[in-house]
Image (cartoon, rainbow, N blue to C red):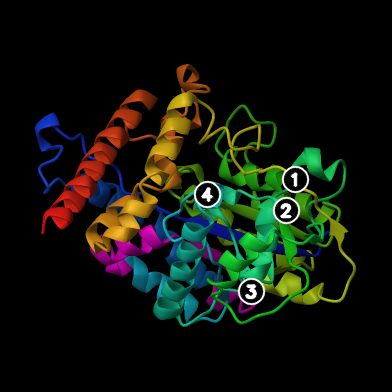
Amino acid sequence: MSHHVCLYFQVHQPYRLRDLRITEIGSQETAYFDDEKNRAIFRKVAEKCYLPTNALLLELMERHPDFRVAFSLSGVFLEQCALYGEDVLNSFRALAATGNIEFLAETYYHSLSCLASLPEFCEQVTQHVETVEALFGQTPTVFRNTELVYSNELAQIARLMGFQGILAEGADHILQGRTPNIPYRPPRFRLPASIERTVRGHRPLDLRARDIVVLLKNYKLSDDIAFRFSDHTWSGYPLHADRFADWIKESPGDCVNLFMDYETFGEHQWADTGIFEFLRHLPQAWQNRGMTTVTPSDVICAWKRKPLEIYDAHTYISWADLERDLSAWLGNRIQDAALRAVYALESLVKESQDPGLLENWRRLLSSDHLYYMCTKYWSDGDVHKYFSPYDSPYEAYRRFSDALCDLRHRLTTSYKLQATS
């Protein structure tokens, strides 16, 4: 019987790519990202999700002083707040001022750098921690990797960086019948010396820990809200707060971790589905059953001296699709080629010491660009097609390749000019 609920929301918006003309490539003044579309999408989601949901959470925290929530706000989302939505940023600051919010760390550019470049991964995590500190006065001590991509090695890297906890998917093939509703730990092992040297050179936190705690998403109960809430064919429809609270109460373990995209509220599940009223009544429904909400740090603190079972993810897992693997981003040849091509420019970009080139390159690292290239179920009109701003995966690849071609031209031109000067 679970007595606690941990609510965690991911908040992210990528920079979507322009359709570059062939004559623009190599012009030295080409803008890669569609500012008009990015602004329009940000403001649409702000009005449908961020502003009303933040206002509702603030109301709930005033009514229920112990109601607690965790967020991770990607760096590129925070950049877009500065560009298009100071009101959105201020609404998150108002939530932070209650003392009931925990901010988690992640890769600043919502990248898959953990797969391709450990130095870049460490730099992005450090940049994100520093940004959260500057904006909200809070130092994250729990790490959430992009798209909940996780492995044993990544957990140990996060531990070396000073984090006391990390989030992961509660994958059935790893749990093998065990509950996701208790904390776990990764297997203990020593990372290669080369990895340790790289990580220790980018330690954003001063914390030292022998172990790191793994908190697992209860995907069945999370997806009841995030994906099935408005599905009229679902046996659980319509879902009300009391019924959902009963399901959580009956779920075995100590704490049910409900992890999902924040855009669930108002954007993926529209207001007319009743999603806001559902959220409005959840804290009272939990309170009536003797349940409390906690943050990831609360869970870790409560289990600090208890023995933890091992969660052994020797290959990468994620929270995407039925496979819970990397195939949403690296499942076909165009995705693999795009990842290799963009990271092949890392040394040139960083050696150029050009802030504009570095910023453009890093924005191209966002995992969304690869996600839009997924061809697994495109003909079925699945979730990949729903989220993509492009007509097809091949259009996504073409736009990405054109931007990368221009970036490569800028870099090589810059080096030629330096060599002749």
Q: Nearer the viewer, residue 377 or 399?
A: 399
User: Which label sits on residue 314?
Assistant: 1
Residue position marked by numbered label 4 in the rendering:
275
Which badge, 3 or 2, comes first in the chain's sequence? Answer: 2
Residue position marked by numbered label 3 in the rendering:
162
Q: Quadrant of residue 398?
A: top left
Which badge, 2 or 4, comes first in the chain's sequence? Answer: 2
**Magenta segment: does it hold 81?**
yes
Q: Secondary structure at mark 1?
A: loop
Q: Which residue in the rendered view is the most extreme toward the right? A: 307
Which badge, 1 or 2, comes first in the chain's sequence? Answer: 2
Placement of 33 over or under 46, stated as above or below: above
**Magenta segment: does it hold 236?**
no
The answer to whether any part of residue 272 appears in the image is yes
Would residue 83 be found to the left or right of residue 372 on screen?
left
Disc 1 residue type (three-letter): His
Q: Does the CB distance between marks 1 and 2 fall below 8 Å?
A: yes
Q: Label 3 vs label 1: CA separation?
A: 21 Å
Q: Secondary structure at mark 4?
A: helix
Specify few, some or many for label 4: CA neighbours under 10 Å numbering under 14, 14-19, or 20 or more. many
Disc 2 residue type (three-letter): Asn
Q: Residue drawn 35% across and 73% down?
A: 90
- Quarter occupied by the N terminus: bottom right
- Magenta stretch bounds: 61-87
Residue position marked by numbered label 2 in the rendering:
152
Q: Position of residue 51 (x, y in %)?
A: 38, 62
| Front label number (4 vs 1) | 1
Q: Label 2 vs label 4: CA separation?
A: 36 Å
Q: Label 1 vs label 2: CA separation?
A: 6 Å
Q: Residue drawn 66% across and 43% down?
A: 317
